[in-house]
Image (tube, helix red, strand yellow):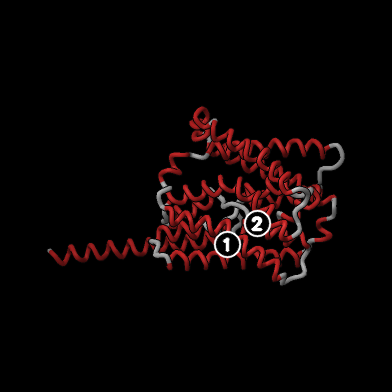
Amino acid sequence: MRILRLDPMMVKLLIVVLLATFLPAKGGFVPFFEWLTTAAIALLFFMHGAKLSREKIIAGSSHWRLHLWIMFSTFVLFPILGLLLVWWHPVNLSNEIYTGFIYLCILPATVQSAIAFTSMAGGNVAAAVCSASASSLLGVFISPLLVNLVMNIHSEMPGNGLEQIGRIMLQLLVPFVLGHLSRRWIGGWVERHRSLIGKTDQASILLVVYSAFSEAVVNGIWHRVGIITLLWILAGSVLLLAIVLIVNLLAARLFGFKRADEITILFCGSKKSLANGVPMANILFPAAAVGIIVLPLMVFHQVQLMVCSFIAQRYKKKNEAELQASESTGKAMMESQK
């Protein structure tokens, strides 16, 4: 069944985690990988900035009610649910795991998969491009502020909050802005080599994950995280996604959005970005804790792809059935008029 398939990126992430488990970076390789990881993060966000098209954003920016709700879902609803999960504390898991769930909840939406699923389901693609791109851009500003606010509430924010935000601005925002400002010169090349850019994105993320899990393995992550913990993380991810999808679906119908906009709200308002989350965690948290903290994000990433793929297929079949019924009705009317 298609819904049970792992996406290629998730398979690569699992391979990298296994590699870090059996062959972690140690000794003199650690400073080298720290430098390489910093460079990879800068390149990743430079490319994100270069890919951001102002024309596409302007094309879908007029639908302010839809965008406002998606931003509410991403940066308000999700963080509230994360805090409620920690307050509820249903299972005796480590503080790093619960921190990981809160961290997951404050991240911006993913771009590529949100747009792809919206297109597959017959949604408002222009609005999806606008919302997903705006979420990714605003996330560079909003997520660090939410980390400072929410993590302080949770008493898990390491170090000086303003210092952490400054590091994020320097390592993420500056390359992002430089990439976007460079678009007038490299925009054509970026458009022609989108597949190469995508591979660069993946390579950067995989490098950061390897570096993070190497440090975590050296500090005994697998002595603290077993199969039962992973199953609870999976259950928490499914519960979190289910609540967000249901709330977004009810809101879309309550506010009278058309089906195309409803689809956009579902897929853009329920996603969380692995591409933004892993590099940002590498800056925000102590190296020994990053591997555990990003586990909920990695599991949620796979869950959202599987569930949203199923939902998109359902919408697609429904649209095709309605189109076929409409064509049959039209033919019947034409024959009756003869």
Q: Secondary structure at mark 1?
A: helix
Give me the residue at 85% from left, 42% from top: 26
User: Which residue is more in the foreground, 121 or 52?
Assistant: 52
**Amino acid, disc 2:** Leu
Percent of width and height locating residue 14:
70, 52
Give me the residue at 58% from left, 59% from top: 76
User: Which residue is more in the foreground, 114 or 142?
Assistant: 142
Q: How many marks?
A: 2
Q: Secondary structure at mark 2?
A: helix
Give me the residue at 71% from left, 58% from top: 100
Percent of width and height locating residue 54:
46, 39
Percent of width and height locating residue 195:
55, 39
Q: Residue furthest left?
A: 338
Q: Which mark is residue 104?
A: 2
Callout 2–callout 1 Cβ contact below 8 Å: no
**Amino acid, disc 1:** Leu
Q: Which mark is residue 170?
A: none
| Image quarter (top left, top right, bottom left or bottom right) of the N terminus | bottom right
Residue 16 seen from this side: no
Q: Which mark is residue 77?
A: 1
Residue 263 seen from this side: yes
User: Which residue is more in the foreground, 140 or 258?
Assistant: 140
Give me the residue at 39% from left, 65% from top: 256
Disc with the residue nearer the chain's start (2 vs 1): 1
